[in-house]
Image (spheres, rainbow, N blue to C red):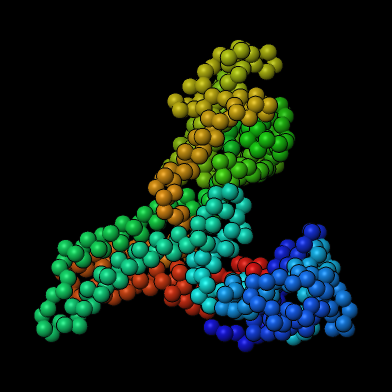
């Protein structure tokens, strides 16, 4: 696809830096860049060559010395002629270079327009384009790794395998339809059952990774709950290895939620310290308690912290029972904090420690000391491993293929899986081939929308609108 206009934009982030890149793409890219570049060789330069010169503005004034790299279409990233001007960094120099190009007749690129042109030129499919945006927005090692796999084409490859299986099935069914008047059968039912079963299983395997994919994309929201003075704030500080929450022996110090992030083994965890759960007549603290209950209900994982010496009281047990009834899918990790005081027999204010970690109310409770973990991060290794085991359930299977991190992909895969399921039901019921063919086409359509084989302008607008200008 050829575009009539030429676009330009700053392709690097604004701010102080050693270098910046201004990108130009389109039919007039070389002509415009040459008109603003003192090195006369640029106009006739072969593809994939670099040239040093000065960029000049409309008045012929030199605005910055730059390196112009030429990529002639169709071997460029966008499939068009592309020139990238590497300028000095900062704000003034790259902006002056961009202004010089705009004054020469090109227009400022829309968000994601360079990548969109690459997609329309067949340089990458829509799933790969979305993976580029995911890599730009990645906030963890796992998110970046998953996005890199998408750019590499692993998502597209997995979908191509499923699509080929469905195309084979559809071809057999529609071939019979073409010869229906002659009562000719080209596919036996066992072959169709096998092909549909394999396609359904492969789609289901991809969908099963969506939970982990959401964690990779958005991070894991871990709420720390418990009574006042259970050690939640200290535990938060130990987990993120910095003083994020105020720690005090005064009960009710934490009045509102405090969040902090930390990457654990490549995954981003968002830890939320909440107000202690207790009945109170203080209006502000009561609002904090209400928010704590709300935060616990919206958590991906709840780490419930109890004092190992006292365990859970009736109010806490009731709260956890109610929460489990409302959120049976919510993983709860029980922590018996201040276990060091049990071992030493000591307690604050001279009180003797007489309880054991089992008093927390859960036999699998982790006994630890958040205070000790402030100086010895390894003291929380057990908690970190418990969190990772909850989040990464099923990752071993996902690692060998792809992880579905994109919500649009998940929805379309669900549609394809539903369509294949309908086709299986039609086949079992002995329905006519035309009904079976309709369901197969619906499944293929859904899969095609993921990679862009089937697209609409509103989908493209939503996808590329996520990009920054210049990408």
The spot of residue 353 in percent (x, y) is: 59, 14
Seen at 28% across and 63% down, the residue is 421
The spot of residue 388 in percent (x, y) is: 50, 39
Q: Is residue 290 visible?
A: no
Q: Is residue 310 left or right of residue 182?
A: right
Q: Quadrant of the N terminus?
A: bottom right
Relative to 357, is 301 above or below? Answer: below
Seen at 22% across and 73% down, the residue is 172
Image quadrant of residue 393? top left
Q: Is residue 53 left or right of residue 459?
A: right
Image quadrant of residue 183? bottom left
Q: Is residue 150 visible?
A: yes
Tally of numbered tags: 0
Between 35 and 364, the residue placed more toward the observer is 35
Relative to 109, is 214 above or below? Answer: above
Relative to 392, is 310 above or below? Answer: above
Seen at 58% across and 14% down, the residue is 343
Q: Quadrant of the C terminus?
A: bottom right
The spot of residue 179 in percent (x, y) is: 16, 82
Between 70 and 214, the residue placed more toward the observer is 70
Between 163 and 221, the residue placed more toward the observer is 163
Q: Is residue 316 left or right of residue 247?
A: left
**Residue at the farthest bottom position:** 4
Seen at 18% across and 78% down, the residue is 176
**Residue at the farthest left position:** 183
Relative to 156, is 120 above or below? Answer: below
The spot of residue 390 in percent (x, y) is: 47, 40
């Amino acid at each position: 696809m050829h575009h009539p206009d030429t676009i330009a934009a700053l392709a690097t982030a604004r701010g102080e830096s050693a270098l910046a890149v201004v990108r130009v793409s389109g039919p007039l890219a070389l002509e415009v860049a040459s008109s603003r570049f003192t090195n006369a060789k640029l106009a006739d330069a072969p593809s994939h060559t670099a040239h040093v010169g000065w960029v000049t503005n409309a008045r012929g004034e030199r605005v910055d010395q730059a390196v112009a790299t030429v990529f002639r279409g169709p071997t460029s990233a966008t499939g068009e002629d592309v020139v990238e001007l590497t300028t000095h960094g900062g704000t003034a120099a790259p902006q002056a270079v961009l202004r010089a190009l705009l004054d020469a007749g090109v227009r400022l690129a829309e968000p994601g327009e360079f990548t969109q042109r690459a997609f329309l030129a067949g340089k990458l499919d829509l799933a790969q384009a979305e993976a580029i945006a995911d890599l730009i927005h990645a906030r963890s090692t796992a998110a970046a790794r998953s996005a890199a796999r998408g750019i590499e084409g692993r998502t597209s490859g997995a979908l191509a395998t499923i699509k080929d299986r469905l195309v084979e099935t559809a071809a057999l069914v529609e071939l019979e339809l073409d010869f229906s008047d002659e009562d000719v059968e080209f596919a036996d039912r066992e072959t169709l059952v096998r092909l549909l079963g394999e396609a359904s299983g492969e789609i289901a395997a991809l969908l099963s990774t969506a939970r982990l994919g959401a964690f990779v994309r958005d991070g894991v929201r871990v709420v720390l709950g418990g009574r006042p003075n259970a050690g939640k704030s200290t535990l938060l500080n130990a987990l993120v290895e910095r003083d994020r929450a105020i720690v005090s022996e005064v009960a009710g110090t934490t009045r509102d939620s405090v969040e902090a992030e930390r990457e654990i083994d490549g995954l981003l965890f968002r830890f939320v310290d909440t107000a202690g759960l207790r009945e109170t007549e203080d209006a502000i603290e009561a609002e904090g308690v209400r928010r704590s209950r709300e935060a616990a209900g919206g958590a991906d994982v709840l780490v419930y912290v109890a004092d190992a010496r006292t365990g859970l009281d009736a109010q806490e047990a009731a709260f956890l029972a109610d929460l489990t009834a409302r959120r049976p899918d919510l993983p709860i990790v029980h922590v018996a904090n201040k276990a060091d005081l049990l071992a030493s027999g000591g307690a604050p204010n001279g009180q003797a420690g007489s309880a054991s970690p089992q008093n927390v109310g859960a036999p699998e409770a982790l006994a630890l000391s958040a205070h000790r973990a402030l100086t010895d991060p390894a003291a929380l290794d057990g908690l970190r491993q418990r969190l990772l085991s909850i989040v990464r359930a099923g990752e071993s299977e996902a690692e060998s293929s792809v992880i579905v991190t994109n919500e649009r992909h998940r929805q379309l895969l669900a549609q394809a899986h539903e369509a294949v399921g309908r086709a299986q039901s039609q086949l079992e019921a002995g329905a006519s081939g035309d009904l079976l063919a309709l369901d197969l086409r619906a499944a293929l359509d859904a899969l095609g929308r993921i990679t862009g084989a089937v697209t609409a302008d509103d989908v493209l607008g939503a996808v590329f609108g996520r990009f920054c200008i210049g990408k």
